[in-house]
Amino acid sequence: MVALPTLSLLLVLPTLALGSHNSPLEQRSPVRAHQHRARAGAFNHIHARSYPGSVEEKMAKRSLGKELARRKADPAKCRIRNSTWTAATFRLSGSTSTVISSSSSITSTSLSSSSVAVVTSSATSSSTEAAPTAAQTTTSSSADNNNQAWVQPTSSDTPAPAQSSAASPPPPPPSSGGGSMTPNGNKAGVSAGDSLPWIKDKIGWWYDWSPNPSGNAGNAVSVPMIWGGGTADGTDAVRLAAFQSMSWTPQYVMGFEEPDCPSGAGSAGMDVSTGIHLWNQYVAPKGDAGAKLLSPSMCKQAAESGWLQPFLDGVTRAPDGIAIHVNKIDRAGIEADINHYAQYGKPLWVTEFACVDDSNGFTPCTDQQQINDFIYLAVSIFESDSRVAAYAYSNGDGLGNVWPMVQNGQLTESGNTYIAALSQYH
């Protein structure tokens, strides 16, 4: 009786041992499998959901960056294989710009060198308006939401730096008269045209005391002048008539020649009221039309006797610069004249400079070495002083036989010295 149950138990043990390996994790009954699928079905709609747009974009950019990294490419300059670009134009600050959408249906091609390309990161963007808060620039695989604009490079090798897509403010309007107070950006000039064949490539401007300077001056600006009131002599009358008939607007106009000294010996000689009347009638309209106007030049230099200020107070259009003459022999004399006329608060044009001892009259220098030294000194002062906008070597009469730049059709030592001095700067 006892042996039978023991024998049965021994027969059942192998079956029990094999059954212990069939754990619920390795094998489920059909009923339990059905129950598991039923419970998991409640979450199927969650698995079916797509990621939010920002996550999809970041994942796509991350994958794109890895793909491009293997090729050592710049994501900002490449497009995905088998895709094309779609371009839409819009107005931005008065210039044509191009918005490139990252939508999957992209078609397009090239940009003009003057266009601005803005790449949006939104996959559903279809707007053609470039609102600064909506435009998103993709300049690298990590740039997501920066409002930037990329300027089309002028060559395929050197891209231009990124610039803001916001409209830049307009440039300020030009000052009265327009243009610079230094002709061609070169202060150096000369009076009279006989030295032009040698010096024209070194100067920015020149004049010959007439309304219509004539001579082959190359690129140097020719500056017309209203010399006097037409009563000093016959030449003065001809010059005034020519200025009155001038129908064009020059870049610059020079005022009267030394009206504060009696007429004759190179001075116009007129009272202040006559000067104001002629200026308002003939010179001011040139300034209103765009010319830069230069004041009358005083023959008494820093010792002027009260002609210029009443003139400036009475004209309807003030000059843009002050014309001065510098006839001195040393640094102190040159700087005294500059400092005096700088008090008027306008750029200075030294329309004549020469080596002259004016301490007791008017005595031109005659020593060549003194003249050479003075030329180098004067040029260095004028070039370095920001208050001086222009200067001209004087080739007028009454300066002796050593100072003139040209004699008998040949350049003198003084002329060569002036050119050598200018060569240090121009």
Image (cartoon, rainbow, N blue to C red):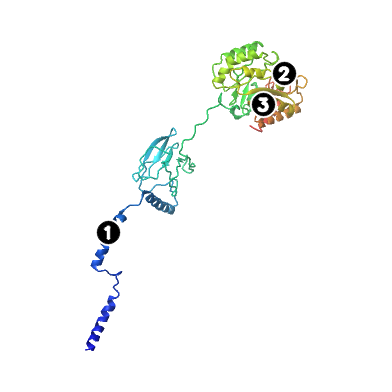
Residue beneath disc 3: 342
Q: Nearer the viewer, residue 357 or 165?
A: 165
Using the numbered discs, state the Cα–Cα distance from disc 2 to disc 3 in whole angstroms.
27 Å
Residue 295: percent from left, percent from top: 63, 20
Q: Quadrant of the C terminus?
A: top right
Q: Amino acid at mark 1?
A: Gly
Using the numbered discs, state the Cα–Cα distance from disc 3 to disc 1 in whole angstroms.
93 Å
Residue 358 falls left or right of residue 238: right
Residue 122 falls left or right of residue 339: left
Q: Quadrant of residue 28?
A: bottom left
Among all residues in the image, which is located at the extreme front?
1
Residue 345: percent from left, percent from top: 64, 26
Of mark 2 and mark 3, the one earlier in the sequence is 3
- Quick check: 205 above or below 244? below
- What kind of element bears circle 3? helix
- Mark in front: 3 vs 1: 1
Residue beneath disc 1: 41
Residue 342: percent from left, percent from top: 67, 26
Name which residue lies at 23% across and 85% down: 5
Q: Amino acid at mark 3?
A: Ala
Residue beneath disc 2: 398
Residue 117: percent from left, percent from top: 42, 40
- What kind of element bears circle 2? loop
